[in-house]
Amino acid sequence: MHTITLIPGDGIGPEVTNAVVRILEATGVKFHWESFAAGAEAYEKYKEYLPQELLASIERNRVALKGPITTPIGTGFSSANVALRKKFELFANFRPIRNLPGVPTRYPGVDLIIVRENTEGLYSGIEHEVVPGVVESLKIITEKASTRIARFAFEYSRREKRKKIFAIHKANIMKLSDGLFLRCARNVSKEYPEITYGEHIVYNTCMQLVMNPYQYDVLLLENLYGDIISDLCAAFVGGLGLVPGANLGTECAIFEAVHGSAPDIAGKNIANPTALLQSSVLMLRHIGETNAAERVQAALERVYQSKEKLTRDIGGTASTTEFADAVIAAMSVATATS
């Protein structure tokens, strides 16, 4: 039995989360879900954006599955996502970018790994108004965090036999902060001679990716660059609605959909649960349920290959519920014929 903290989120969050939970339970793996609200919904009930019961559950279970949570733009409460990453030292944001069968894109056969430092940089949230009309935001880069994320990227690459890592930076202008990030990456790279190490300036990386994403393998980035480039790379395979995300630390892990809460279609049963489902596959691997992870991924790819039960965002007519039913059916067929 795996006890998992569940954060359905808001907007389309509860719909896609319910679909994913049904698929996971259909694997036969035993789950116990501890479900909690977060963000604006939690504040209405508890006067806290991240209730203490939620935080205690994550600390106890060490694994959470999270739907999208709306973050107000320019005003309102700070990002619940960022707060959770800081609270539990989820220093590695991990996003694999791979094509799904049957989804036409400009770039077939993409296989990229985005490794993003998740706790500092410009997302440290240290900003203040100096005088009226002048705001200062501090970018924090530390040797500890930079070394830790570099080692994560190289260890992953060695374990999964990835061949090449590029550290992405703007050290030609931010010589101290990005310079420190690069020095740490270079030092760690010396311990992994079988992995080719390179460096690209961030704006050049964006151009190179659009021209030829196949030249990259694993991208190692600090926080803001990683946030931007991971979204850019998602476009290669069909968008944020199709790609998974994981926030990993030494003690806890939170697996999440990286797309928004889409309040305009909330409650209509038309949202695509693929991103959260692929994130749950990462979760299954994390908790040691490798066989279930492979079955879910294979069933998902069969549904995309057949194109009969796809949601509207990718040209189909299926509802969220029908899509989940199709994935479950595909798993059942595969089990019966294996």
Image: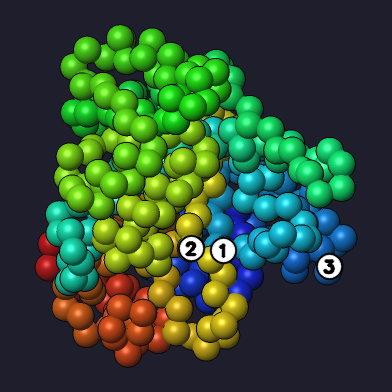
Contact? badges 3 and 2 (CB < 8 Å): no
Q: Mark 1 = which residue?
A: 68
**Mark sitting on residue 259:** 2
Q: Which mark is residue 267?
A: none
The residue shown at (22%, 59%) is: 99
Residue 123: x, y in percent? 62, 40
> Above or below — where is 163 with respect to 289?
above
Q: Nearer the viewer, mark 2 or mark 1?
A: 2
Amino acid type at image mark 1: Pro
Callout 2 touching callout 1 (CB < 8 Å): yes
| Side of 49 relative to 88 (left or right) | right
Which badge, 2 or 1, is on the more N-terminal residue?
Answer: 1
Reading the image, the residue beneath label 3 is 45
- Distance, label 3 to label 1, CA atoms, is 18 Å
Between 123 and 332, which is closer to the camera in this rendering? 123
Corner quadrant of residue 202:
top left
Q: Nearer the viewer, residue 270 or 168?
A: 168
Q: Is residue 58 above or below residue 192?
A: below
Sequence-first disc among 3 and 2: 3
